[in-house]
Image: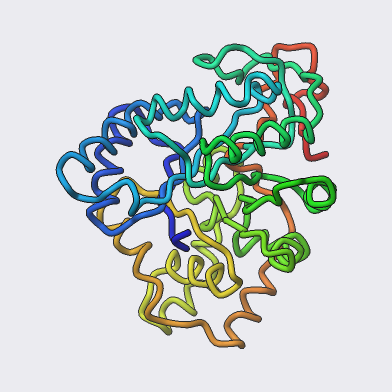
Amino acid sequence: MPVIAYGTFRSAPGEVGPAVIEAIKAGYRHFDLAHVYGNEQEIGVALKQAFDEGMVTREELFITGKLWNSDHDVDVVPRAAVHSLMNLQLEYFDLYLIHFPVCWKHTGLSTPSFGASEFGDTPLIDTWRAMEGLVERGVCRSIGVSNYPLLLMHDLTTQAKIQPACNQIEAHAYYQRASLVNYCLSRNICVTAHTPLGGGAANEETWSTPSPLKDPVIIEIANAHEKSPAQVLLRLLLQLGIVILPKSVKPHRMAENLNVLDFSLSEEEMKKIEALDKYVSYKTNPNPLGAFLGGKDAYCAEGTDIFD
């Protein structure tokens, strides 16, 4: 798995296809996708163009997909994976993840639930067994999870026949999650950070959260290395053994996010950044908090926080 991936969340229609092409040209070979992002078909067209034009071969790419919350039922899991692959015009996923540790009632493969969502009744371990079946049938090369806290990770590892290859989580300078990260790494489970920059301007606008990109400590370290704050935040995670998923549709930002392997943070700099940890989730990627609004399973004014 390449340690720097291109993320496709929060990409508008008509934007993500050209962005994927630009990312391939920039050198990205790992692409992080999800059915609920609503852009699989456009990405599929872009990937086919890249293959047809000889920019890259399928074997040179590492493609991650995700199973949405409303597709957890055992009989739906294989159909959901195939549905996504058909959208993407691919034959297999290199990695397929359970997007969130929560089951919602199935609402159709083409209409993933995100609004008035209701809890389903399929246990997570049953969904995982169906995921294991995808590996056995060659639909996925490996399987993993996303947004799993430590206790659920431990519960899964004690029951899984095929161990999870990855846990994709919110992790950044303000939410470093040392216990969860080190637990996963100790068991050879890859940790991938889906919000390596703390969510940037989008999170500032949506959640009114402070951005580590503007932190004086990060800016000071960036200036010392003649790098951008974003590059320092990405380098931090790489040095912690975490795969990073930066996202930008701007070619110069794509190149900048890749250019983080030619410098290192000192032990002193790492300690300074470690001290910035606020241990507060920014509820990104997104937390499906508001997806319950309008339904019977909304248990607070904001919806339902599955991580409470």
Q: Quadrant of residue 80?
A: top right
Q: Is residue 31 above or below residue 264?
A: above
Q: Residue at x 33, y 32 (%)?
A: 44
Q: Residue at x 32, y 46 (%)?
A: 58
Q: Residue at x 43, y 45 (%)?
A: 63
The extreme left residue here reads 53
Compared across the picture, whether 101 is left or right of 82 comes to: right
Compared across the picture, whether 30 is left or right of 56 comes to: right
User: Which quarter of the figure is the C terminus placed in?
Assistant: top right
Compared across the picture, whether 186 is left or right of 192 comes to: right
Q: How many marks?
A: 0
Q: Nearer the viewer, residue 106 or 143?
A: 143
- Residue 264: x, y in percent? 47, 82
Q: Nearer the viewer, residue 290 or 95?
A: 95
Q: Is residue 192 above or below residue 216?
A: above
Q: Nearer the viewer, residue 59 or 225?
A: 59
- Residue 40: x, y in percent? 40, 29
- Residue 60: x, y in percent? 33, 54
Q: Quadrant of residue 182?
A: bottom right
Q: Residue at x 55, y 61 (%)?
A: 212
